[in-house]
Image (tube, rainbow, N blue to C red):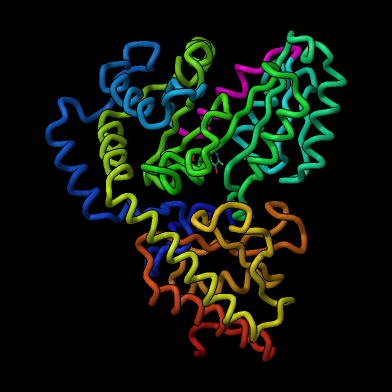
Amino acid sequence: MPISDLLRPVSTAAPDFFSSDYLSVTTSPFVRDAFLRNLASSPRILGSGGSRLGTGNTDAYTHIEERLRNLFGGPGIHACDALLFNSGYDANRVFWSTVPQKGDAIVFDNYVHISMKDGMFQSRAGSTGALYPFEHNAIVAFKERVGEALKEHPNISEGKGTLFVAVETLYSMDGDFARLREIFKAADELIPAGCAHMMVDEAHTTGLFGPDGRGLLFELGLETRVDTVLHTFSKAWGMSGGVIMTSPLIRKYMIMRGKPVMFSTALPYSHICGLNTVLDYVTSTAGSEQRERVRELCLYFSDCLAKGLRSVSPKLLRLDDVEISSYHRQTVVSPIFPILTPAYTSLANFLGAYGYAVTAIGFPAVPRGQERIRVTIHAGNTEAELDEFIACLMRWASGMQNGKRLERSRL
Ligand SMILES: Cc1ncc(COP(=O)(O)O)c(C=O)c1O
């Protein structure tokens, strides 16, 4: 790909089936009006003028953190204090690079986001090689890696170190959920009480599941089982930024050690105003309706696509057969659909000609043989749009099966 193409503007000509704006917050007229109203009455709207630890911290930041504490914290929850970051990437990197110490070890799903891995490698635990990745979502592998980590770090079972465990709730490349219950159960069985620190990244589930959009842990009643949680505002919240929910002690430690907290200017006030506006929306009845709408549309899409794919060779086009929703209750449906095809660039070019902002995903982003495009469903999509998109997929597949490389101009 020529370098000039790397940052080409994304098409907005066709419906959005590709962004992480699951609740369609960014195009909601309701949110737009509320935001402009709130902004008009905000005492400050532009830059904060400094970092949180320097001159940039005001009551606007402490107020949003208090709201986040109230939303994601609660009785019996260890991850009860909130520290706001300019991005989910910063939040993960600061937590993972500062908190695990020499003598600690980290067991993590091999598919966790790069922001976690970057932090882990920079941490004192990482610099001593105490990192134990396990095969994605494989409980047997998880147990083996925990066993190895405890054996190689006997100080942890003696209460002189901590075994950190890192997973995501929903993995965005495959659209599959973590086996949270099994992981927590195995951790309880294998790691002596008080020696584990469970960290969960809710980037793709915050806003989308749970009462008031509190996330998948709340949806499954597992919110008291974790020590630290990341929520990003860049997905279902339609903004950017992130919050680490953790203990007051760890929050304090991250403020003292986290370089972005010290050396990067705090988010602009307009952004804080946006976060307050979206928090109101996500926790409102309208937010619940949007969540339900995503679920309905996901079921509709998976049903219609499965019907369409019956006439297509799975060698050409298939839905990834990961357990998309069966692991959890029927109410929890993944909004991410990986559609696998070896002709992924041809398919992406074909859809791109219709204005879809599709990305072709090949090796090394995914293993060879698992090349794909990835469809995400949003509350603002309609059944008619989904029908048209599936029809487009089928036109491409039938052209390919008939040996023709279709261009839109020839249709
Ligand atoms: C699982 C996960 N964690 C963290 C991040 C980083 O979040 P942000 O985009 O808010 O920096 C992402 C972003 O794609 C993500 O998918």
- Is 337 situated above or below 22? below
Residue 156 placement, left or right of 206: right
Q: Position of residue 271 (x, y in %)?
A: 30, 34
Picture quarter containing residue 347?
bottom right
Q: Position of residue 335 (x, y in %)?
A: 50, 58
Picture quarter containing residue 53?
top left
- The residue that appears at 84% across and 14% down in the rendered structure is 154
**282 in magenta:** no
Q: Nearer the viewer, residue 266 or 9?
A: 266
Dominant SS in magenta: helix
Q: How many marks?
A: 0
Q: Nearer the viewer, residue 368 or 175?
A: 175
Residue 139 placement, left or right of 212: right
Residue 286 placement, left or right of 407: left
- The residue that appears at 48% across and 23% down in the rendered structure is 76
Q: Which residues are magenta?
A: 87-103
- The residue that appears at 86% across and 19% down in the rendered structure is 152
Q: Position of residue 62 (x, y in %)?
A: 31, 19
- Is 390 situated above or below 299? below
Q: Position of residue 199 (x, y in %)?
A: 60, 29
Q: Nearer the viewer, residue 54 or 244?
A: 244
- The residue that appears at 64% across and 40% down in the rendered structure is 181
In which quadrant is the N terminus drawn?
Answer: bottom right
- Is 36 situated above or below 324? above
